[in-house]
Amino acid sequence: MNPLEEQRRNFAYGNVAIGNPAVTREMVDEAAEELERESQDWLDAEHYEGLVAGKAIEIVCRETGICLNELAPMLGVGKTTLYRWVRGAGRPSFLDRRALWELLPEIWSNHKRGDAGRQG
């Protein structure tokens, strides 16, 4: 991994881990690696973090079976907004990213423990 990529991942991980220690470096790395495979061109660290958040949403939905339509109200955003984040056509605000990084690890943990992965 080149130094710039490592710095970007550290930035993304650091920003989300401050708000939620349940977020793992592995989650950020997995999302970043999937984005790399798609050969995206990063503009800046904030844009990159937004793209990682969108990819993390996609991975969590795929792995847990929760669809975007179900996840949107859990996050308190509209379906269209959530679809834009996943496609990379928009990026979550700082507060939305904090909410994402608080909820996604909880959903992921519930799924890994064998729970349905759905929130009340």
Image (cartoon, grey):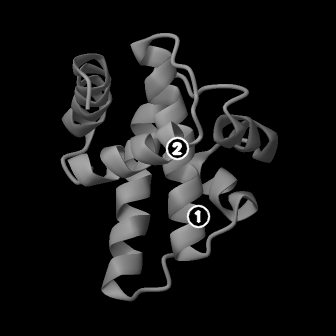
Q: Which residue is at a point 50% across and 62% down the rendered structure image? A: 60
Query: Is residue 4 positioned above or below 75 on the image?
Result: above
The label shown at residue 37 is: 2
Q: Secondary structure at mark 2?
A: helix
- Relative height, residue 90 to residue 28 (above, below): above
* Left or right, residue 10 beside residue 38: left
Q: Residue at x 48, y 77 (%)?
A: 117
Mark nearest the camera among 1 and 2 is 2
Look at label 1 and name its amino acid: Cys
| Marking on residue 61 | 1
Q: Is residue 35 left or right of residue 27?
A: right
Identify the element where label 1 is drawn: helix
Counting labels gives 2
Q: Amino acid at mark 2?
A: Arg
Tell me where residue 17 appears, x and y as whole percent. Answer: 22, 38
Q: Position of residue 100 (x, y in %)?
A: 46, 44
Q: Quadrant of the N terminus?
A: top left
